[in-house]
Amino acid sequence: MATRIARTAWNGGLQDGQGQVELTSSKAGTFDVSFPRRVADDAGGVTSPEELVAAAHSSCYAMQFSALLAEAGGTPVALEVTAEVTVEPDPAGGLKISTIALTVRGEVEGIDEAGFRETAEKAKATCPVSKALASVPTITLDATLES
């Protein structure tokens, strides 16, 4: 299987520094990062590790869910997956990811609501990024089949 690479170049201290994270393997882009924007309500056009985790989780989950729906006899027409990653102070020091809320809305032929929800939970448990994030205290899922 493949290995993917990202690289971050950082200049300065935590509060006054800034960096750029590069999606090296795909060459998809380079994005600015900064600590003050990481914890601000308004990111101001700057990404963060948590946003990148959210992107990884939502895309991985969508792929896994699509595969499992097909295995369950469904035909995915459209899936929209959102991952909300919350970062907060860690009593042990620094920051921690405290929750991840996955939301999926899907149009799937050949599967009922119960099958959709069961498969959604299975995808949450078996998505490689979900497995990597198993130490996050709370990962929730809100799954709705739309017709």
Image (cartoon, helix red, strand yellow):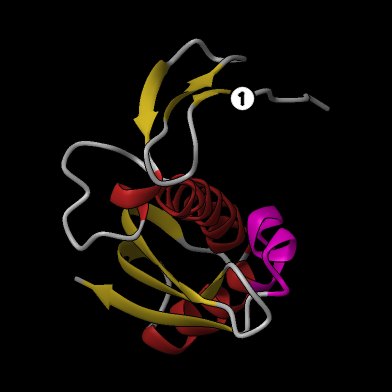
Q: Nearer the viewer, residue 60 or 38?
A: 38
Say if the magenta span includes residue 64: no
Image quadrant assignment for residue 24: top right
Amino acid marked by disc 1: Ala
Image quadrant assignment for residue 143: bottom left
Question: Can you say whether 8 is above or below 134 in the image?
Answer: above
Left or right of 60 in this view: 50: left
Q: Quadrant of the C terminus?
A: bottom left
**Residue under the point 56% across and 56% down:** 70
Mark 1 element type: loop
Magenta range is 125-135
Question: Can you say whether 15 is above or below 46 in the image?
Answer: below
Q: Position of residue 7 (x, y in %)?
A: 61, 22
Question: Can you say whether 97 is above or below 40 in the image?
Answer: below
Left or right of 6 in this view: 113: left
**Residue under the point 50% across and 19% down:** 22
**Residue under the point 59% across and 54% down:** 64
Question: Pointer 1: what residue?
Answer: 6
